[in-house]
DNA sequence: CAGCCGATAAGCT
DNA sequence: GCTTATCGGCTGA
């Protein structure tokens, strides 16, 4: 599989059987499995882990149902141990009841409520004691689209079109709503556990480059280049015209 | 399409 | 008391 050059990430695994290799959305492709990443994957600085998470699969299993999407947009938030502390990070004033998960071991979900009505999900990075994390900002849905639409209060579009896919999980709180994630049920879960309801899986989808831009919706450190997205992917949140540069995945 | 605005409550000072 | 890592609806161009 490869990253796409237009619109949506592309699954080529089945293309040879059905057409001449034209790009097609990966939700029509064959995502069916994958393996959790090792703990060591998460035990690096968030600005390294964040771009590496692009293309990985976030899976929520609930009552036999599988809701999943490919990660297409992330942001890094630096822990207070960093040389220049990150004023936009929840952890920047040290541990509190809310952000405790961030100071624990790497590879755990930090789910918090925001604006009284939404949730956002991060993955903790770095060894215990260091509170770097990666905010998951957008998915390209690959499984459980009908359930996601229901969770989001949207009408199911069949066959799925790009605008429908985009509305499902393009935004950090849309993502949580689509997958049914909440602080009470998912904060602190280990995303690399084989038995966890919430996992991040690697299915060998290859990503070579990321677009780098400033982070969204923050007031401090607005010029830090810590937002990473899949080049040209339609499910990335916000405006489609990026002014960011491309960088190789570290 | 870009920009503004209100909803709504946990979390922290 | 004040802020907030958002979203969706509305306005105006």
Image (spheres, coloured by chain):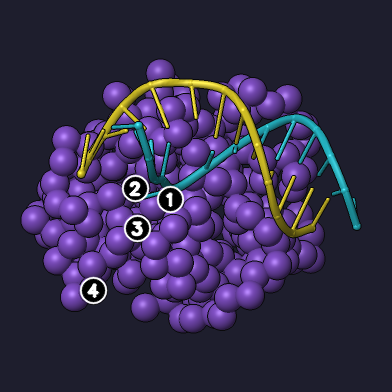
Chain colours: A purple, B yellow, C cyan
Q: Is residue A214 above or below residue A120?
A: below
Q: Residues within 10 Å of mark 1 (few under 14, many from 20)?
A: many
Helix, strand or loop status at disc 4: loop
Camera-nearest label, 2 or 3: 3
Packing grade of label 2 (10 A; few <14, some 14-19, many >=20) is many
Pointer 2 with pointer 1, Cβ within 8 A: yes
Secondary structure under badge 3? loop
Res A62 quadrant in image: top left
Residue occupying the point 57% across, 42% down: A169
Residue at screen point 33% across, 38% down: A111
For discs 4 and 2, the disc positioned in front in the rendered view:
4
Chain for disc number 3:
A
Q: Which mark is residue A122?
A: 2
| Tag 1–tag 4 contact (CB < 8 Å) | no
The residue carrying mark 1 is A136
Q: Position of residue A203 (x, y in %)?
A: 43, 55
Q: Is residue A180 left or right of residue A44?
A: right
Q: SS at mark 1?
A: strand
Neighbourhood count class around disc 4 (C-alpha, 10 Å): few under 14, some 14–19, many 20 upward? few
Q: CA distance from mark 2 to mark 1?
A: 6 Å
Residue assigned mark 3: A88
Residue A243 position within the rendered picture, expressed as x and y whole percent measured from the top left: 63, 75
- Return the disc, 1 or 3, that comes first in the chain's sequence: 3
Question: Which quadrant would the C terminus of chain A be assigned to in this image?
Answer: bottom left
Q: Position of residue A118 (x, y in %)?
A: 46, 32
Q: Do the residues marked 4 and 2 share a common chain?
A: yes
Q: In the image, what residue occupies the spot 44% across and 58% down? A: A219
């Amino acid at each position: 599989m490869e990253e796409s050059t237009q619109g949506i990430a592309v699954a080529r695994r089945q293309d040879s059987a059905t057409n001449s290799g034209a790009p097609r959305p990966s939700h029509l492709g064959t995502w069916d499995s994958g393996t959790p990443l090792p703990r060591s994957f998460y035990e690096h600085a968030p600005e390294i882990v964040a771009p590496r998470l692009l293309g990985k699969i976030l899976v929520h299993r609930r009552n036999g149902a599988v809701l999943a999407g490919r990660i297409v947009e992330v942001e890094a938030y630096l822990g207070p141990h960093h040389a220049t502390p990150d004023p936009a990070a929840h952890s920047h004033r040290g541990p509190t009841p809310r952000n405790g998960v961030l100071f624990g071991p790497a590879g755990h979900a930090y789910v918090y409520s925001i604006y009284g009505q939404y949730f956002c999900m991060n993955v903790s990075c770095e060894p215990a004691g260091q509170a770097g994390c990666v905010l998951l900002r957008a998915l390209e849905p690959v499984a459980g689209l009908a359930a996601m639409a229901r969770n989001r209060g949207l009408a199911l579009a069949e066959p799925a079109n790009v605008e429908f896919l985009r509305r499902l999980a393009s935004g950090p709180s849309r993502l949580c709503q689509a997958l049914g994630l909440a602080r009470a049920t998912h904060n602190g879960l280990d995303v690399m556990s084989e038995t966890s309801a919430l996992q991040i899986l690697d299915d060998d989808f290859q990503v070579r480059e990321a677009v780098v831009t400033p982070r969204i919706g923050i007031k401090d450190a607005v010029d830090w280049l810590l937002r990473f997205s899949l080049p040209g992917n339609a499910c990335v949140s916000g405006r489609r015209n990026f002014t960011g540069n491309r960088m190789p995945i570290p």
